[in-house]
Amino acid sequence: EVRHRALELIDLEEIVKNNVLSKVKMPQMKTVRNVITLAREIKARLENELLCIEFMSTDVNKSRFPDDKSLVGRNGDFLLYRLTGSEIYACLRERLRSISETAQRLTVVTQEKLAFQWLVEVFQWVEEIEKAVTDYSSLDGYKRTRLFIDFNSATRILMKGEDIFFNIEDVTKEILRAQKISIRLTPQRIAVVVLKGGVANSPGAHLLRWGALLYGCIKSDVDRAEDWEHRASTAIETYKSFSLDGSISHLGNATRFRDNVE
């Protein structure tokens, strides 16, 4: 489903090159020329500040990516903070804010503006994940920090991420593809692949790679939570069934139990 009909910059430029303008004077031409200037600026900044130029820093998080099995890494670290606490993320936030000011002044939706707005959606989704994180250590007296995202929030965030990635406009995918960034979507997975000649450590590519990773992590965590809930419900119902027919008495001498029901 197409949500916007985005203009091509070349079409706008063709308007001011039309021969008829040498014979008539159009008062709207000043506005059109201003639109073209802003559209060119957004195109240039999208490419040069977000997609085509490598972010130079010593930040190890810009190239090392974990797997997408859980938001909690193998060593117990909270993977989200590897992104949101990095130099490249802070740079990305500032660049998106700055380009947004120009995009707001552009009164039409060009293909590059549409692609930029989609990147902003992905960034805002990541920030929504961070806002959903809760520290429960102060509530239960646990000595170490314990970070959680409650199940309802995780499910809502997962659905929002699915909507953003799976409803990406074809023209946005084409713009990214032109910069050697491929968005590959399957029912079970989102993959962002930087092709040969692309810049994997550009702020935009970095955001999209992490966005796909976080989606996979949250999906895995939600799936495990749903599976645990199903197994727990099955165990409870089995216990109730045994209790009603008197079979529970046969468990009196048991010394070991498992947390799953077969």
Image (tube, helix red, strand yellow):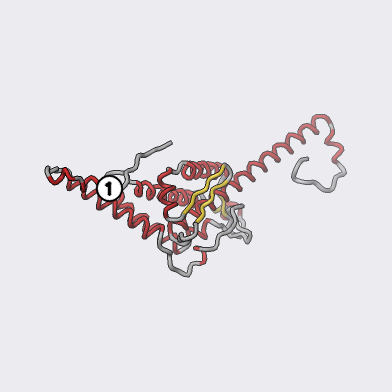
Location of the N terminus by quadrant is: top left
- Pick the residue in front: 130 or 4: 4
The kind of residue tagged 1 is: Leu
- Pick the residue in front: 211 or 18: 18
Location of the C terminus by quadrant is: top right
Relative image position of residue 106 (x, y in whole percent): 27, 48
Describe residue 24's horizontal placement relative to residue 224 as left or right: left
For mark 1, does the 10 Å Cα neighbourhood hold few (<14), some (14 to 19), or many (20 or more) residues? some
Q: Is residue 36 above or below residue 87?
A: above
Residue drawn at 78 percent across, 46 percent down:
258
Q: How many marks?
A: 1
- Pick the residue in front: 191 or 239: 191
Describe residue 193's horizontal placement relative to residue 40 as left or right: right
Q: Is residue 167 above or below residue 144?
A: above
Relative image position of residue 162 (x, y in whole percent): 51, 43
Residue drawn at 34 percent across, 48 percent down:
113
Looking at the image, which residue sits at the far top? 245
Residue drawn at 47 percent across, 51 percent down:
126
Looking at the image, which residue sits at the far front? 19
- The residue to which callout 1 is attached is 106
Q: Secondary structure at mark 1?
A: loop
Residue drawn at 64 percent across, 45 percent down:
224
Relative image position of residue 146 (x, y in whole percent): 58, 55
Relative image position of residue 6 (x, y in whole percent): 34, 42
- Pick the residue in front: 257 or 211: 211
Describe residue 20's horizontal placement relative to residue 196 as left or right: left
